[in-house]
Every structure is written in structure tokens, then in C-alpha cells.
Image (cartoon, rainbow, N blue to C red):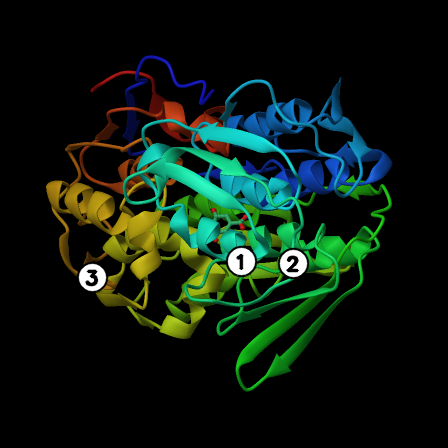
Amino acid sequence: MSGHGDPIPMTSSACGPLTGTAEVPGDKSISHRSLILGALSVGETTIEGLLEGQDVLDTAKAMRAFGAEVTEHGGGRWSVQGVGVGGFAEPSQVIDCGNSGTGVRLIMGAMATSPITATFTGDASLNGRPMARVTDPLALFGCAAVGRSGGRLPMTLVGAREPVPVRYTVPVPSAQVKSAVLLAGLNAPGKTVVIEAEATRDHTERMLAGFGAEITVEEKDEGRVITLTGQPELCPQHIEVPRDTSSAAFPVCAALVVPGSDVLVPGIGLNPTRAGLFTTLREMGADLTYENEREEGGEPVADLRARFSPNLKGIEVPPERAASMIDEYPVLSVVAAFAEGLTVMRGVKELRVKESDRIEAMATGLRANGIDVEDGPDWWTVTGKGHGNVPGGALVASHLDHRIAMSFLILGMASQESVRVDDGGPIATSFPIFEPLMQGLGARIARAGA
Ligand code: S3P
């Protein structure tokens, strides 16, 4: 279940400096993959720092339904007793992935080459999102899918009895699609090849290698060519989930726009396939520094230090950077509202098929709060008002989208009038401690006001 009950209206008001240390929870992408790859291994995978957000809890439940033993030990420690590649059992119930596109698409890939049938559903947001982008390539392995019109959930997948390996060029920049194909390739004999023209987050490739799969990545003219040898025995791992780069974006951006702020966000991954927002903010003139740069689990990590930045400038975000900050455009658009001049965001069509149409949701909400926004099919612009000049004062709809809700709560922290969000409930999907964490830094967020 999405766990989504009654709406939780929230109000965010101008506050004094945000100060202190913001320890954000585990990375959502890596948490999903830890559970799924743990379930596909033979033996016990142990996980520390798992994100206990609803999206990941729904994936944990799904892995149990496919036969893995998933145990919570408290304090972010979990273990998964895997069933091995090809060992998934047929679930006896519908798999409800709640709000999570990553959860459903990766799990579809993981079951697509096993001789089992499973039916998937989700909340109103997930059931409106396109699934053909994964079921089309999964059909090449021999997996059949029947869903609602437009390739929407609820949807039943009949896994391939005799899967064949595939060679597939991902038509949209999507780590979820790439990952679904790779996970399906695990149980196909021979080599499955996935080609992506633009690099997207590479956690699946890195983690598959860590679990002992034979996987190579080559940079060629056609793009990144990923070759996976099927039917490996995956070896259980101990995983320490790094803190979530996308969640770190919220306290970082809040500190940049709230006068006097100085916030440390420790232990954040700077994997180039994820960290595009921080590069962009620095180009806008943000006082954002990387302290204590180091390597953890083979990934570049730093403590981020963000200070109030009164002289932010609008910029044109290079479209080729989009994949590395795709989840951060909503909060970037909030920072852009406090900058001087125009921020231009191009090559971002994918934003229209996230948990909500994020261009539409942000454009509507920013306009209601006195900010000029223009948008087209794959671009949008925000005309910044400059620090101290953002009116605020409006009620916005979060559209079952955690990042829309959190972005507007950041807007309210530095606008002239409070900003209200109709439903902050979805925040629990990815960042369940957002409210107390931000309040601990000095934010004024209250549960009321819609
Ligand atoms: C994710 C990939 C991205 C991202 C999502 C997480 C993942 O989606 O927006 O939040 O973990 O693979 P797409 O694959 O649709 O780009």
C-alpha cells in the first residue's frame, strides 16, 4: 500500500537562519536495489542505513511476496535471505508498489524472466504512469504484459518460460528502464546488452558487479554499452546505504535561500550520475562547498556545507546535465525564484511523467505564489525575483508527489507570506524525517493551513 491516508495539509513560514547538521536518510535508489538484489542472491544480504520510506517498505513487502525472507532488525538494519536468480516464487496476492515507479519497474524486470505470473498496482499517481517503457523491452525476453489502456497499472506480467537474452537501446534517459532490462537479463542465458545514449544513474551496474555478476560498461559512439552475462549466482553482500543525494538537496537549497543560514549535510554521494544539482547551484553563485571529500564503497562522498547566498543568479542549465539531476528540478526552480534573472531548464521532458507532471505542478504553484514561469513540452523557465522579493501566500497542490510538497515548503521558508501545501503525506515515501529534520535546523513548518 502507499500508506496514503487522509491528506496532511502543511504550512511553511519565513524563519530565522537555518543552522546545524542535517543527517538525511539512506538513498532511495540504492535501498530499492539492495532489497531486490539481496532477494536474487543465494544467502543472506545485510543492509545498514536502509531508507525506511514507504516506497522502499513497499519493495520489501514485494520481495517477501516473491519468496525472499526480509527482516527488519531496527535502526535501519535489515537482512534479506535471497532465493537466487530464477528463484522467485509466484506471489499469491497483487503486488502493490504504492507511489513507487522505481519499485514497480525494477521488480517487473526482476520477475520477467521467471515462469511466474504477477499482477502489479499502485496509488493513483503510479497507476497513471507509463509502464510500456519497461514492458516493451521485457517482451523481447518473452514476457507478456496486459494492463490498462496506455500501458498503465494495474497490470499483469506473465514471465518468460524460456527467456532469450536481448540487445536493447533505451529510448528515453531512464535508469529505471535500463535497470529493468538488466535485472531481466539476469535470468536469461547468454549476454544481455543495454545501450543508453545518455548516462543515467549507474547504481544497478555498480551493485550488480558488487554482487558478483559479470558486467562490463564501455563508452562507445552509440553511448554507454552495458553487457551482462546471464544466469550468474549472485553472492550476498553487506551493504551500507549512503545518504540520499536527492534528499540532501532540500536542506541544501533551504540554507541557500534563508538569510543567515549555515547548514552541514554530511556524507552525501557525489556520483556524477546523481550530483548535477550541486554543480548547477555553484554555477548560480551558491555558497556550497564540499568538505572532507573521500571515497566510501567506491563512491565519491563529501560533507556538503551550504550557506545563505544572497546573490544567486539565474542560469541556463545544460540539457546534457538533466539526467544527473532529474529529481532535483522542482527544488532548483524554487532556488531560481530567489535568484536574479532567468533560469532556463531544457531537455526535461521526463519531468512530465514522474510522480506528477512536475513541470505543470511547479509552474502552477510558483505562479500562484507570484513567480513568472513559462513552460513548453520539454522546457521551462523561471524568472527570479531576487532575495526577499518572493511573494508566496498561496495554497498549492502536491499531486501525490513528495518532491513537489517538499519544494513548496522550502519556498515558504523565505517568501514574504507563508506557503501552504494541500497534502504533505507523500513526503513519507522518500524522506520520512523531513519535517523534524527541517524543524531542527530552525524551519517553521506546521501541520495545518490548507
Ligand atoms: C530512479 C530513476 C529515475 C528517478 C527516480 C529513481 C532509479 O527515474 O527519477 O526517482 O532509482 O532508477 P527514471 O528512470 O524514470 O529516469
Residue 340 in sight here:
yes
Q: Amino acid at mark 2?
A: Val
Q: Earlier in the sequence, mark 3 or mark 1?
A: 1
- CA distance separating discs 3 and 2: 37 Å
Instruction: Report helix, strand or loop for mark 1.
Output: helix
Instruction: Report helix, strand or loop for mark 3.
Output: loop
Residue with the mark numbered 3:
377
Label of residue 140 in the image? 1
- Of 24 and 305, nearer the camera is 24
- CA distance separating discs 2 and 1: 8 Å
- CA distance separating discs 3 and 1: 30 Å
Q: Is residue 87 above or below residue 253?
A: above
Instruction: Give the farthest residue toward the bottom.
Output: 221
Res 320 → quadrant? bottom left
Residue with the mark numbered 2:
164
Q: Earlier in the sequence, mark 2 or mark 1?
A: 1
Residue density around tag 1, few if under 14, some if 14–19, many if 20 or more, within 10 Å: some
Front tag of 3 and 1: 1
- Of 16 and 285, nearer the camera is 285
x then y, percent, for residue 275: 53, 60
Q: In the displayed structure, does residue 326 sit left or right of residue 229?
A: left
Q: In the displayed structure, does residue 251 sit left or right of residue 304?
A: left
Q: Earlier in the sequence, mark 3 or mark 2?
A: 2
Q: Amino acid at mark 3?
A: Pro
Question: At 15% across and 33% down in the image, what residue appears?
Answer: 393
